[in-house]
Each structure stands twice: as structure tokens, then as C-alpha cells.
Amino acid sequence: DGGITQSPKYLFRKEGQNVTLSCEQNLNHDAMYWYRQDPGQGLRLIYYSQIVNDFQKGDIAEGYSVSREKKESFPLTVTSAQKNPTAFYLCASSPGGTGNQPQHFGDGTRLSIL
Amino acid sequence: AQSVTQLDSQVPVFEEAPVELRCNYSSSVSVYLFWYVQYPNQGLQLLLKYLSGSTLVESINGFEAEFNKSQTSFHLRKPSVHISDTAEYFCAALPLSGGYNKLIFGAGTRLAVHP
């Protein structure tokens, strides 16, 4: 079955440590996205990529970095500069590069601070 | 600026009762509209969408939503809910302004169905 796979499901970070969240899709979608979800705040866009080797900052990109070296992969690194990283992180993809298609979501990674 | 407002953060309801989850949007351009459902510790699943055509759209599990342009609303309804409908529901709007269009989410409504 086609879909989006996020790993790990749960992740713990120590102070001052960078961690990388994996997102892989086999839907042949051009566009991929990373969102952060906090209780009562809905989803906020961190980064998005419309095509391989290109990505753009979303609304809350500070303290995060991404890469898009392959169409199917869009890893997110939470750096030590992100002072409040505890959240649920969701990866999504959509067919079109202009974003005007429904987005498909992975099952998320829950990041906590030790 | 575009925005999506979900008017209720929580909606408790008894099983087999009807429910309405309210969503209003604000946009200076035309929009596509979506409802997503999220079960605990899972991602979002597309429930239904309005792109064009008939203003009443339906999902396969009995939900429906009506696009009302004059009231800028896209409320989600179900005539009889089940325990399994307990989840968080997100309304989202996609403004069609050319180029890349960012999906804008509401804050979510937590539907709790009680026996």
C-alpha cells in the first residue's frame, strides 16, 4: 500500500542534542511538508518542499532544518537552537508542487525532552 | 490575511445523537476546503473536501459538510454519531492565489461521543 512512513514513533532528546525525524513516502508525490502540532493550536507549518533539491521555510522554521535529496524522503532535524521542541511532528505530502491538492499525512513522531 | 476558525474546541455528545462541528474561514480569494480527522497518536486523515461544484459534500462514513460562501462557513455534520467517531477534527482552507498555496488549519475540535 502507498503511504507515508514516519519514524521513530517516539523520540527523546537530551539538552543540546540534535535529532532527526524520518519521513518517507511511496506515493510519488512532488510536494512534502513538516508540521508541528501542539495541544489546542492546530498544525503549524515548519518547512515545505515542492520539488527535489528545493525547500522553503514555513511559519515556524527557526531551530529546524530539512533536506530533500530524494523525491521520497524529507527528513527534519530538530536542532539544539529549538528551545521548546516537545511536540507531535507530522509529515505530509501532496501530488502537486503548487499545493492545491489534498495532503496525505504520516502517523507522526512524538518528541520529548529528557 | 487568511484564517480558519473552529468555533468549538470540544463537543461532547451522546451516541446516536446528531452533531455539528462549526468552521468559518476568512480569505480574500477563492478557497478549497477540507475536513480532516485525527485519532489519538495518529496522523490526519482526509474526511471530505470541497473543491468546486455541489456545495454539499459527503464522506463514506456518514459525515457531510456544506460550503456556504455568503457565510464563509464549512460546517461538518453527522445525523447520528457512534462511539468510534470520537476524535479530533480539523477544518482547513487552501487559498487559490496562484503559485504555492499554503494549507491553513483551524485549531481543531475534539468530539467526544459518550454511551
Image: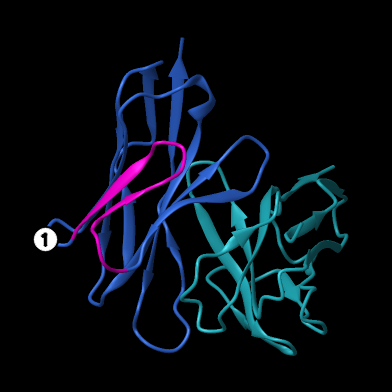
Chain colours: A cyan, B blue
Q: Is residue B105 above or below residue B100?
A: above
Quarter of the image holding residue B96?
bottom left
**Which chain is home to disc 1?**
B
Taking depth in this image into account, of B103 and A13 the one nearest to the observer is: B103
Taking depth in this image into account, of B56 and A71 the one nearest to the observer is: B56
Q: Is residue B90 left or right of residue A72?
A: left
Q: Is residue B110 above or below residue A26?
A: above
Q: Is residue B38 above or below residue B30?
A: above
Q: Which residue is found at the position 27% from the left and 59% from the top?
A: B25
Looking at the picture, how far across and down is residue B9, in whole percent? 38, 36
Image quadrant where one finds the N terminus of chain B: bottom left
Does residue B1 appear in this view? no
Q: Which residue is mark 1?
A: B70
Looking at the picture, how far across and down is residue A55, in whole percent? 66, 84
Taking depth in this image into account, of B11 and B31 the one nearest to the observer is: B31
Q: Is residue A6 left or right of residue B90?
A: right
Q: Which residue is found at the position 24% from the left and 60% from the top?
A: B54
Taking depth in this image into account, of A112 and B35 the one nearest to the observer is: B35
Q: Is residue B38 left or right of residue A27?
A: left
Kind of residue indicated by mark 1? Ser
Looking at the picture, how far across and down is residue A24, in whole percent? 80, 66
Q: Which segment did they paint magenta?
A: B52-68
Any magenta on residue B56? Answer: yes
Looking at the picture, how far across and down is residue A15, in whole percent? 85, 53
Taking the view exactly as shown, the residue that stands out farthest to the left is B70
Quarter of the image holding residue A22?
bottom right
Q: Residues within 10 Å of mark 1 (few under 14, many from 20)?
A: few
Quarter of the image holding residue B39?
top right
